[in-house]
Image (tube, rainbow, N blue to C red):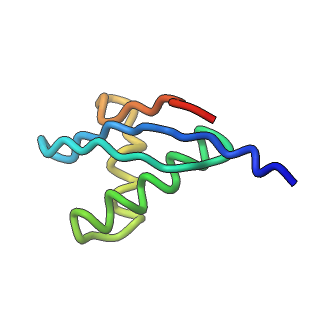
Amino acid sequence: MESNKYLYKGSFNWYGYTMKLYCYARSERQALFLFIGKVARKVETSHRIVHYYFSDQTRDGYHIEKVAK
């Protein structure tokens, strides 16, 4: 059975601290969810706070792109 997961690269700007992260996910939406968890662990805060920060449409805080299959 094929997993249909793709490699995604995410660039995140957390209050001026820039992070480049990678993960395998089935969709860009799932990748964003996984990246939010990784950012939360890196900055030692909750998933909810990171999600709220990046859900603000007025700031360009992240970019996600599909790298490979």
Which quadrant holds residue 63?
top left
Q: Position of residue 28 (x, y in %)?
A: 59, 38
Q: Is residue 5 left or right of residue 44?
A: right
Quadrant of the snapshot with the C terminus: top right
Q: Which corner quadrant of the image does residue 9 belong to? A: top left
Q: Is 8 above or below relative to 40?
A: above
When asked about the image quadrant of residue 64, the answer is: top left
Total labels drawn: 0
Which is nearer the eye, 6 or 30? 6
Q: Nearer the viewer, residue 37 or 23?
A: 23
Left or right? Give the position of 45 relative to 27.
Answer: left
Q: Residue at x 31, y 68 (%)?
A: 41
Q: Is residue 67 left or right of residue 19?
A: right
* Residue at figure coordinates x 27%, y 70% from the top left: 45
The residue most toward the right is 1
Q: Position of residue 52 (x, y in %)?
A: 39, 53
- Above or below, 58 against 1 in this view is above
Q: Is residue 48 above or below residue 13?
A: below
Q: Residue at coordinates 87% horizontally, 54% vertically from top-left?
A: 1
Q: Residue 35, position in %: x, y?
A: 43, 52
Q: Position of residue 59 (x, y in %)?
A: 29, 31
